[in-house]
Image: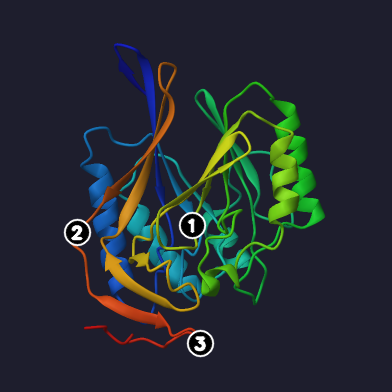
Amino acid sequence: MADQPNGPVMVIAQLSDTHINDDAPEAAVRLRAAVAHLLHLPAVPDIVLLTGDCAEHGTASEYAQLRELLRPLTVPVYVILGNHDDRPRLRALFGAQGEQTMPEFMQYTVAAGPLRLLALDTHVPGQDGGTLCPARLQWLEERLTEQPERPTIILMHHPPFRCGLAPFDAIGLDAIAEFGAVLARHPQVTRVLAGHLHMAMQRPLHSALAVTCPSTLHQLLADVRRPAGLEVRFDPPAVLLHTWSDDTGLLTHTSPIGEPGPVVVMHDGQQWQAPPWPVRG
């Protein structure tokens, strides 16, 4: 943490949905640019989080490539699973992270200066939607009960709210109410950091602000007036920066990388379109 006149400041960078792909080099190019972006920030992050969909197909070679792309970061990097990931392969390459881990799921805690991070595993093998089963929710309840006064950040891939876009809500978290019930009992949770949507969204959730991180591959700017389909503009990739000081508490802002792209049709209201996606004139 850097010392400032108003006390120490901690900077946590969040990357998401990197989708490293053996068959498409663009994802690696974009992640390399994102890592360089972090290294050239005025305040280099103290911690980097990667909130899921680390690889497109979950292959060992994609995860090996991911690890090499992250190597220039000299600060701790913590990863969680997304729906595109493979639990055994990701765990084999990155190992058990943090403390108080679960043997069957990639859930763990991290002491981050004045903050505490709780990483959740919403992955369901073979499915795009996510879940938090009773065992995972019980682990969360127990961890939150341990330190009720410490400001806490929860990490999860699938956001704990409906986004209003039918294609994404169909593959969202199926335990929104159950997660919310746990959160309601623990007001020390100040942020819930998620991915999955490839865009920045925020929603109050009990004492916390739930936020989704843009993708480093492409950020989607969806037309919420047409929720059945998904026409998007490829906005610049971006990262989220979460900064903490005793003076300000936790602040979050978006740090974009690059220039906007075209508007494309990813979902026509009936089904997902295969790339290359049709471009709307």
Three-letter residue code for mark 3? Gln
- Nearer to us of marks 1 and 3 is 3
Disc number for residue 258 = 2
Which residue occupies 47% across, 84% down? Answer: 272
Which residue occupies 34% across, 12% down? Answer: 6
First in residue order: circle 3 vs circle 2? 2
3D distance between C-alphas at marks 3 and 2: 30 Å
**Along the line of sight, the residue nearer the viewer: 62 or 265:** 265
Q: Are marks 3 and 2 in contact (CB under 8 Å)?
A: no
Q: Are marks 1 and 3 in contact (CB under 8 Å)?
A: no
First in residue order: circle 1 vs circle 2? 1
Is residue 213 positioned above or below 57 on the image?
A: above
The residue that disc 1 covers is: 195
3D distance between C-alphas at marks 1 and 3: 22 Å
First in residue order: circle 1 vs circle 3? 1
Is residue 172 positioned above or below 46 on the image?
A: below
Residue 228's x, y, as percent?
50, 77
Badge 1 local density, few (<14 within 10 Å), some, or many (20+)?
many
Which residue occupies 52% across, 55% down? Answer: 94
- Nearer to us of marks 3 and 2 is 3
Badge 3 local density, few (<14 within 10 Å), some, or many (20+)?
few
Is residue 4 positioned above or below 205 on the image?
A: above
Question: Can see residue 164?
Answer: yes
Q: Would residue 40 appear left or right of 212 to someone viewing this image? A: left
Which residue occupies 33% across, 69% down? Answer: 27
Residue 21's x, y, as percent?
39, 75
**Displayed quadrant of residue 134:** bottom right
